[in-house]
Image: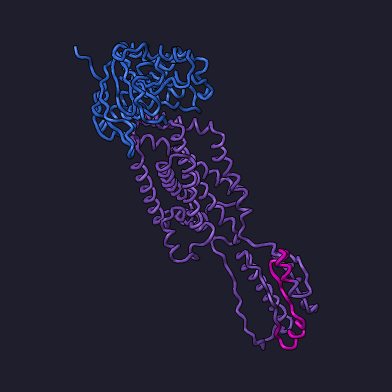
Chain colours: A blue, B purple
């Protein structure tokens, strides 16, 4: 049986002037999978994710997210996705509870549902004692977990995570991946970029991006087999050796 | 609509949590209204005067006394020669030198004619012209007094004189504060409308929160209304605080109706909020927004008629002021506060302001993009 596709791209390209950040990438993401996007800094991961989220208009190529076209139906896509940016971007001067209420409100949820779900989420995050603290008082690891739970607060079909575990300690990273598994288990498709190779092992399928192009796309197991490598780390080095682009 | 309520709740929480913004909104206006009208005075007082009295007669002393007792001049230097008097100007000890030549009294009595020289330091143009004019006026009064002394009122008095009686309409006491305070209210509203909005939105760009907003299905108009409404309300609150201070401290109560002022202010704020929004769509950092806004506000203020009359500007500058929104509010608030003009009297200005409001906001909304 053919799996339902929630993201499809064909020759998706983004140029900034003379610079081609993303060069003709084509792939499909299936419903409910954890889809990993691997690449060095500057490989074009963030640009790709922003095009899929409707934050950046592609230069050429095709892409559909949740069945909607990125050129013409960006706002419809936005209803169906959650997004967590590389840079922490919740409101520092609002409390945990207020941030949840704000974003849930923007997605059109009613106050009663918001209240209920806020309590649930706080319990899951074990953030109940800090619920009324300003977000800027939380440690980074907690902020990231909070950002993730706000990204999936409105039950999106797909959630895009752009280097969600950057700068976070190993324990918090592990906890973070547990949250990702739970969300995937609940039927949310996860699109995650990372430059931690060990995290690639947690994904159902992995894409390796080098210099704006997709060099490999398969399950972690298959990739290791194809490239005769012990780990994804090794696969990555074999592929990334050809890179010419400098990290930004 | 419900989305908007969530956004408004968020903005107000943030405004009330930010001590700096609170101070800018509520303390700065009070300070400005208490300090500026007193410090930025249009009246010229304490003009330093150097007297070169080479006559040493009773008339020359009377004249000096008259100048001193006028309240505008302070005798800071008494020089023996005109040259010394000029030195006093050079050393910043005097603003003007009045030289009473030798034989002043004798010439006055014998020939009914005498000369006096006034030399003014014109580095400060306002002080020079006003000081010179005061001195001239006092001397001519002195002149009239001695004529009256010599020529007792007889019907043969063959020196006809025109007596001028002034009547200052709309500001009978010529109180410059009555004139200046409404201008400061305009200044405050403009700052809140233009600057705070621009900085607020660009700050969200800087810290990246706007990206989290742009990735939601929020409508442009909801986001913009969520940003503009809180500052619109803030602006009207500031105007109210301003009027309370004006009434309590300066006893300025508009001769016209508050309704006219508030209606105009409401439209004016929409225009400047749109202006701030427009700046924010072109800036990526708060620094850029700040500099660009200040550049425009500086020009707008100086060319608004707030400090100098538009009528005295060169023709091309007068034409430019028609494109300056501040000009219209300064004009209207003075008309309503001092002259008691009605809404009907200022309908032309209101119409122009509506056009500014529409223009700035349309431009800003078109230029605001969720997808780059």
Q: Quadrant of the C terminus of chain B?
A: top left
Of all residues, the one furthest to the left in this rendering is A1
Rendered position, B31 above or below B43: above
Of residue B148 and residue B118, the one placed in the foreground of this image is B118
Q: Residue at x 43, y 35 (%)?
A: B205
Q: Classify residue B335 as left or right of residue B247.
A: left
Q: Is residue A202 visible?
A: yes
Q: Which residues are magenta?
A: B85-114
Q: Residue at x 48, y 58 (%)?
A: B303
Q: Residue B329 location in percent, x, y?
A: 46, 53
Rendered image quadrant of residue B159: bottom right
Picture layout, residue A31 above or below residue B296: above
Residue sitting at x 44%, y 37%:
B201
Q: Quadrant of the N terminus of chain B?
A: top left
Q: Residue at x 29, y 33 (%)?
A: A58
Front residue of B160/A135: it is: A135
């Amino acid at each position: 049986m053919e799996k339902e596709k929630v993201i499809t791209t064909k020759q998706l390209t983004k140029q900034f002037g003379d610079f081609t950040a993303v060069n003709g990438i084509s792939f499909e993401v299936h419903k409910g999978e954890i889809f990993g996007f691997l690449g060095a800094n500057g490989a074009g991961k963030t640009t790709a994710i922003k095009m899929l989220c409707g934050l950046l208009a592609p230069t050429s190529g095709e892409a559909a997210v949740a069945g909607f076209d990125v050129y013409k139906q960006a706002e419809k896509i936005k209803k169906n996705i959650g997004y967590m940016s590389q840079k922490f971007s919740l409101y520092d001067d609002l409390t945990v509870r207020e941030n949840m209420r704000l974003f849930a409100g923007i997605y059109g949820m009613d106050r009663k549902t918001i209240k209920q779900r806020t309590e649930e989420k706080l319990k899951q995050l074990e953030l109940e004692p800090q619920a009324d603290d300003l977000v800027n008082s939380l440690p980074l690891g907690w902020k990231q977990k909070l950002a993730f739970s706000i990204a999936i607060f409105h039950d999106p079909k797909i959630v895009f995570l752009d280097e969600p575990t950057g700068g976070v300690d190993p324990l918090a990273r592990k906890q973070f991946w547990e949250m990702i598994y739970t969300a995937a288990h609940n039927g949310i498709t996860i699109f995650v970029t990372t430059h931690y190779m060990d995290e690639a092992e947690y994904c159902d399928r992995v894409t390796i991006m080098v210099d704006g192009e997709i060099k490999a796309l398969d399950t972690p197991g298959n990739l290791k087999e194809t490239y005769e490598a012990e780990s994804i780390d090794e696969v990555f080095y074999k592929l990334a050796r050809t890179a010419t682009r400098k990290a930004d | 609509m419900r989305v908007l309520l969530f956004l408004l709740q968020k903005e107000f929480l943030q405004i009330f949590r930010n001590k700096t913004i609170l101070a800018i909104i509520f303390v700065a206006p009070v300070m400005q209204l208490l300090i500026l009208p007193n410090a930025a005075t249009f009246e010229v007082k304490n003009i330093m005067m150097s007297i070169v009295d080479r006559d040493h007669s009773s008339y020359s002393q009377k004249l000096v006394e008259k100048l001193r007792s006028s309240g505008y001049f302070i005798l800071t230097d008494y020089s023996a020669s005109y040259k010394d008097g000029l030195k006093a100007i050079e050393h910043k000890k005097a603003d003007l030198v009045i030289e009473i030549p030798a034989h002043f009294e004798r010439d006055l009595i014998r020939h009914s004619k005498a000369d006096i020289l006034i030399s003014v330091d014109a580095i400060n143009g306002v002080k020079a012209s006003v000081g010179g004019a005061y001195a001239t006026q006092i001397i001519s009064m002195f002149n009239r007094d001695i004529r009256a002394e010599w020529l007792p009122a007889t019907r043969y008095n063959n020196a006809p004189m025109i007596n001028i009686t002034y009547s200052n309409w709309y500001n009978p006491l010529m109180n410059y504060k009555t004139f200046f305070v409404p201008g400061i209210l305009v200044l405050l509203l403009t700052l809140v409308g233009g600057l705070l909005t621009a900085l607020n939105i660009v700050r969200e760009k800087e810290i990246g929160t706007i990206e989290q907003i742009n990735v939601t299905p929020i409508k442009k108009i909801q986001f913009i209304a969520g940003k503009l409404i809180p500052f619109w309300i803030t602006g009207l609150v500031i105007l109210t605080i301003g009027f309370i201070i004006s009434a309590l401290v300066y006893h300025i109560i508009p001769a016209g109706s508050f309704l006219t002022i508030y209606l105009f202010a409401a439209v004016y704020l929409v225009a400047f909020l749109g202006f701030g929004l427009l700046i924010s769509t072109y800036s990526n950092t708060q620094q850029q927004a700040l500099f660009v806004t200040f550049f425009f506000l500086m020009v707008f203020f100086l060319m608004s008629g707030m400090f100098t009359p538009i009528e005295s500007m060169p023709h091309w500058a007068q034409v430019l002021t028609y494109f300056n929104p501040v000009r219209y509010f300064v004009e209207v608030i003075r008309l309503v506060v001092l002259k008691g003009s009605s809404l009907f009297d200022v309908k032309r200005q209101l119409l122009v302001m509506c056009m500014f409001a529409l223009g700035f906001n349309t431009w800003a909304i078109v230029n605001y993009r969720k997808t780059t």
